[in-house]
Amino acid sequence: MELLAQRIRNLSESETLAMTRKSREMKERGIDVINLSIGEPDFNTPEEIKEAAKKAIDENKTHYPPVAGYPELKKAIAAKLKRDNDLDYTPDQIVVSAGAKHTIANTIICLVEPGDEVIIPAPYWVSYKEIIKLARGKSVIINTTADTDFKMTPEQLKAAITPKTKALIFSSPCNPTGSVYSKDELFAIAKVVAEHKNMFILSDEIYELINFECKHESIAQFDFIKDQVVTINGVSKGFAMTGWRLGYMAAPVWLAKACDKLQGQMTSATCSISQYAAMEAMRTDPKKSLPVRDMVFTFRKRRKLVLEVLKTISGIKTNMPKGAFYFFPDVSWYYGKKNEDKVIENASDLSMYLLEEAHVAVVPGDAFGNPDCIRISYAASIELLIEALNRIKKALAKLN
Ligand code: PMP
Ligand code: GLU
């Protein structure tokens, strides 16, 4: 352990992956665990995308691709950004990586100097803070509450900016809260950032297609800020392609070039077959794609069901998520309660209790910067969700 570099000793394990690992281990021991901890669509990749990948294998597309991605894929991404988001990017502004997580890591490593501050509105996705830590940057957290639908206000952002601020990173639709920023809200944020020319916005739009109530808005649409924005997206969520490992960024050319250089020394291009699959995904208009529309429709049905059941459980407070596929309920009412010798002090205790007592895996809110909440993923079938929520309800009823 002490032989490990300090940067790794300081790094926390991803809590989403840790809970999934724990539930997998319990399943291997024969325990019937329902895993609502991982954020991954429980759907299969659409057939046409799989066919494109099979064809790529048959055509021997098995050599090293250019580090930042095949030109055809970058062109297809640029066309997608125009078609769906009305954003004008050229292929040399695009870098394809092994998932949006990799894209975020590339961007942060290229931008953040030791001591630089990166603003993150909480609740936030688990990996932002840890990647910033790896770059020896400092995370500056803006706390938000259910009263503002867990969204930061421009005033909060303004107050958090210092001469050391290098970036702001956030996701919309948000993991874990499902909050979605409107065009007006993004405009107000863009106005604040535009006052600080050395500051960047890392706009994580990986849940773009899982949005139930409004049109997806990209902050790069405002021309006065576009040079300060890195648009981050990928195929994992919208096309149920988590295992293919493909994400991308669209950014100013100089930053795209830097990420290309970094990637060229660390990982090289992502898998050639995944790139051919992603070309098909990018050419698919999500508004016309049956598999994508079915998936979103199914998520919407589940969201309704989960909300109805959560409302019947005493002590749980939740908002209605507008996007992504998570609920992030406040469970702090249970803190201080116990079942025999098991005392619940915090979200981690409650999550462990639910895993052991109800055999349902969820993620403690601390990992997302809010210790009063837990994250429940509804990327599971209606039957499993009903069973899991019943088990949760029963286990919670035993706490007093
Ligand atoms: N951003 C957010 C908000 C996420 O929830 C995830 C989870 N997969 C990612 C980025 C990374 O996605 P991937 O690496 O699978 O493209
Ligand atoms: N992003 C997903 C989640 O939040 C997948 C797990 C991960 O990559 O952390 O659960």
Image (cartoon, grey):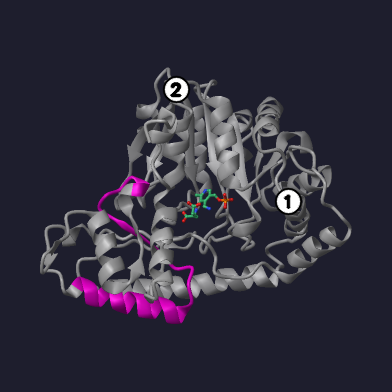
Whether residue 219 can be seen here: no
| Residue sitting at x 33%, y 75% | 389
Disc sitting over residue 1 in the figure = none
Residue 359 in the image, given as x and y percentages of width and height:
32, 72
Residue 57 in the image, given as x and y percentages of width and height:
82, 59
| Residue sitting at x 78%, y 61% | 53
Which label lies toward us, 1 or 2?
A: 2
- Say if 42 sits above or below 363 in the image: below
Q: Is residue 240 left or right of residue 378?
A: right
Q: Amino acid at mark 2?
A: Asp
| First to last magenta residue range | 367-396
Q: Nearer the viewer, residue 33 or 141?
A: 33
Whether residue 136 can be seen here: yes
Q: Amino acid at mark 1?
A: Lys
Residue 82 in the image, given as x and y percentages of width and height:
73, 47
Res 361 → quadrant:
bottom left
Q: Is residue 266 left or right of residue 172?
A: right
Disc sitting over residue 116 in the figure = 2
Q: Residues within 10 Å of mark 2 (few under 14, many from 20)?
A: many
Res 309 → quadrant:
bottom left
- Say if 183 sits above or below 343 in the image: above
Q: Nearer the viewer, residue 90 or 263?
A: 263
Earlier residue among tags 1 and 2: 1
- Verify whether residue 370 appears in magenta: yes
Residue 393 in the image, given as x and y percentages of width and height:
26, 75
Badge 1 is on which residue?
Answer: 80
